[in-house]
Amino acid sequence: MAVNSPLSAQNLSFLHSLQIPRNFAVPCLCKAPENGHRKPGNSFRICLCKTLESPQARGPVSQRTPSSTLISDSSVSNGTGAAEPSRGEKFLQRQMAMAVIDKTKKKKKKVEKSRVLNSALVCCYGCGAPLQVEEEDAPGYVNPETYELKKRHHQLRTVLCRRCKLLSHGHMITAVGGNGGYSGGKQFISAEELREKLSHLRHEKVLIVKLVDIVDFNGSFLARIRDLAGANPIILVITKVDLLPKGTDMNCIGDWVVEATMKKKLNVMSIHLTSSKSLVGISGVASEIQKEKKGRDVYILGSANVGKSAFINALLKMMAQRDPIAAAARKFKPMQSAVPGTTLGPIQIDAFQGGKLFDTPGVHLHHRQAAVVHSEDLPSLAPQSRLKGHTLPALDVKSSNQEGDGSLNGISIFWGGLVRIDVIKVLPQTRLTLYGPKALKVHVVPTSKADEFYHKELGVALTPPSSPEKVKDWPGLQMVRHLQIKLADLKSSLSVDEERS
């Protein structure tokens, strides 16, 4: 029997998957009587209306429902006759039910994940160390009773750990092994672990605010910051400009910073001279952050003790004048301390809409004084007011001069126990001015007696170290630099040629 049908088997399967509303009028392709639809010539046409509407034509449900379908036909409304849902309606109802189940599962999974994070990764808002109740001497320790009470009321993010409370009362408690005169122990974390906590930044899209201490510009610059920040944009912030001597030309300082930054081959978006104490330049940084963050998180990076926490507190204070979100964030400010490694983990701060502000652990550098000086001596080396110069004129060293001509030739200058300067040969009227903290005393002796004076007075007159007991762990003066100062013009700046040995 010849079959004359405009619908092949492939077209039939396509028609079965159509989503046609129940009240949609489907035109019949044949005008023959309903029983048989026969035409002369032993041929017939398949009626489209019967193919879509007849349950017998659609076949049993078990053959039409895919094995991966989670929702059965029993979950949708049933009916008979004219009230029976069409195939398209059943399909839509199943899809809607599946979407509700998927949404419920995702919501439960998100809630469970947030519970795990809240219970396992809640950190001290002062230092960023994970809260714990086991080791009392370790960072992040909280009294068990206090921990349970705050946990019961969902207030763990308002808890300050025991170490931060001691730091706030002036105690010098280090937590970074190998820094501050400590070799480390189970309660310490290493500088490498702190750096590892920042390694994820190079894979994310964030805004980096890099802080540099103007008093120790080269030592705190972090020339290899791209290893941490990746290709993210950088705003360079120079801190502690309020410590510069009175009358310093800030325009010259800015030009010098730009030139030094270009020499280090580090392209930055903008440079700001700031003071967290007097709030100089903070408003400009706040405006630049709001302009450039574009919904991204903002990370404050810098070496240890460069003033990151103080900068964040000043930034929040400035932003709180116009933004209530920043005003609320000031209630839980990061801890400030002269101890290297005060911040032990990223601290999230809800400072503005569209992105978060993060205080980060300081990057510890082996060549900075915080790596060798005992933590108890660090506060005396941190300047609290403007630096004042200590000038060594020729008349003050006449008695100590080997040649007796009143010049600086042949003398050695000790700047506490940290620095020794041997003057080999200078012009007769040369003067040397030293800028540093008041606690760092200057001693002048003949170079021939310098070694004897150093070993005898170290820990006594030459401090730091501040006591003979700390002298045992003192590394001593190890680096030697030969400086040759060239004076081409009295009105021009000096050029320095440096050699190391």
Image: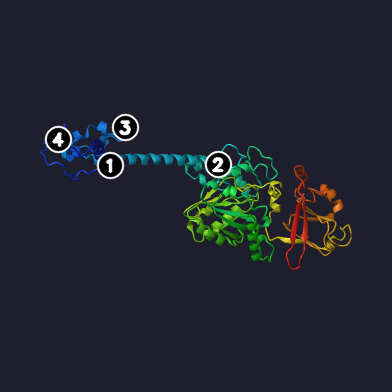
Type of residue at label 3?
Ser
Task: Find disc 3 in the rendering and name its residue.
Answer: 67
Q: What element carries label 1?
A: helix
x, y (%) of residue 77?
23, 38
Task: Find disc 1 in the rendering and name its residue.
Answer: 92
Q: Residues within 10 Å of mark 4 (few under 14, many from 20)?
A: few
Q: Residue 131 carries which label?
A: 2
Q: Is mark 2 on a helix, strand or loop?
A: loop
Return the residue nearer the eye: 413 or 443.
413
Return the residue nearer the eye: 246 or 57.
57
The part of the image, by quadrant, that contains residue 35 is top left
Q: Which mark is residue 43?
A: 4
* Earlier sequence position, callout 2 versus callout 3: 3
Image quadrant containing the N terminus: top left
The residue located at (23%, 43%) in the rendering is 20
Type of residue at label 2?
Leu
